[in-house]
Structure formats: structure tokens, C-alpha cells
Image (cartoon, rainbow, N blue to C red):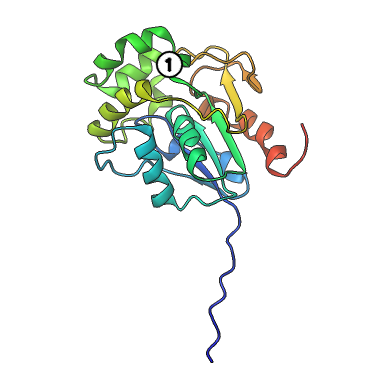
Amino acid sequence: MGSRPFFMPRPPQLHALPGMGADHRMFPAPWDTLPGFIAHDWPRHQGEASLPELADRVVDEFGVQPGDGIVGASLGGMVGCEIARRVPLRHLILIGSAEHPTEVRAPLRMVHPIAAITPFRPLVRLAARIPARLTEGFGASEPSFIRAMCSAVFTWRGCPVQMPTPLRIHGRSDWIIRPPPNADLLLSGGHFISITHARDCVEFIRPLLSGQER
């Protein structure tokens, strides 16, 4: 009898999901020093119109497995919450993200139908109040993806209540998502702290990945 093939399980991966319309550049060095870290671009849009649909696509495209982790910035964190409904994650880390659409600041909730038809880069600069050089990774997604996700965020049902509480890192001056009162780490920046405060985020997260208590 021939021997059956033996497959070694791969080490856990830490999948990083960017914000809406952004790409892997939301996670500059030293993010890549975290064990198993992979910064993803969004898959090409194939008509996904909700966060659950996008979560299904991400799990399939990127091979998210039980025991992996998700680091999600902005939209990426919300999609991470949806992935946690489907896959038992070891870590779920939200960077300037939300557990429910009510955490998005009121002005953005009121203008989101307009945002769906507005060029994305000027909207980001206005809402985030950051220099244009920090938005170089934006505008990477198709307009159809951005339009669909602008609506999808506000019809999302939020993180599952039975899920373990995610780690949350926020900027005090975030003009898009309100920092929650129970944030695990508050930094001095705005919405794009995964870029502007990359080292602070990484140094805070690293002990968690190694099983150390903070």
C-alpha cells in the first residue's frame, strides 16, 4: 500500500486588511517585523455589496484559517469582525476601526450617500485632516468597490456579541471613527495611525502575539 501524503500545518498568519480604497501601504515598516505578518490589498471587486460578502471573499482569497489573526485598519477592522463569525481567530486587532456603524462620526453618516459618488482622495484628505503625502496608498480600489462599501458600512450589523472583545487601538483626534471609552491604546494621532504611528502600534501588539501579558 502506498503511504498517504502528510501535510504539515502552516504557522499562524497575521493578515492585515487596509481601509476603504487603500492598499497594503497602510501598514509600513515596522509592521512587517511582526510574526506571520502579511499586508493585503483588497481583492478585485466582483460585486460584493455587504461586509459579510466581502469577509467571505477575503477568507477564500487569502486562505484565512483557524488560529490566524486579523489586523484591520478602518474598514479592514470591520471586515475582521465579520471574519471572526466564520473563522475562530487567535487575534482580532482593530486599528482606528469600529465594532458598530454607530461609532462612525455623525457627519460621515450623513454624507455617506454623497461619498459614494465623490472622488475618494479629496474626501480622505478632508475627513482625516492629514497631509496628502500620507494618502498615497489610497485610490487603489475600483470605484465600484468604494461605492459599494460606502453603503455597506452603514447597513452592517456590527461585531457579534458572542465574540471575544477585540483589541482596539485608536487616535485621539480621529475625525472618522470615535475612539471608544474602552480603547486598549489611545495615541495622539488621527484616523490613519497605522501609518503615522506604526511603531507605537507594533510595539503595543508584539507582546500580545508572543502570549505575554501587558
Does residue 175 appear to the left or right of 21 in the view shown?
right
User: Which sits in the foreground, 50 or 58?
Assistant: 50
Q: Residue furthest front?
A: 162
Image coords of residue 8 (percent x, y):
59, 68
CA neighbours of label 1 inside 10 A, class few (<14), some (14 to 19), many (20+):
some
- Give the residue displayed 39% in from the left and 44% down from the top: 56
Image coords of residue 10 (percent x, y):
58, 61
Amino acid marked by disc 1: Ala
Q: Residue furthest right?
A: 213
- Give the residue displayed 57% in from the left and 13% down from the top: 172
User: Is residue 65 in view?
Assistant: yes
Q: Determine the image quadrant of residue 43.
A: top left
Above or below residue 63? Residue 41 is above
Does residue 208 appear to the left or right of 193 in the view shown?
right
Q: Quadrant of the C terminus?
A: top right
Q: Quadrant of the N terminus?
A: bottom right
Q: Secondary structure at mark 1?
A: helix
Image coords of residue 179 (percent x, y):
56, 15
Q: Residue furthest bottom?
A: 1
Q: Determine the image quadrant of residue 107.
A: top left
Above or below residue 161? Residue 209 is below
User: Is residue 22 in view?
Assistant: no
Say which residue label 1 marks. Answer: 128
- Give the residue displayed 25% in from the left and 43% down from the top: 46
- Give the residue displayed 51% in from the left and 17% down from the top: 190
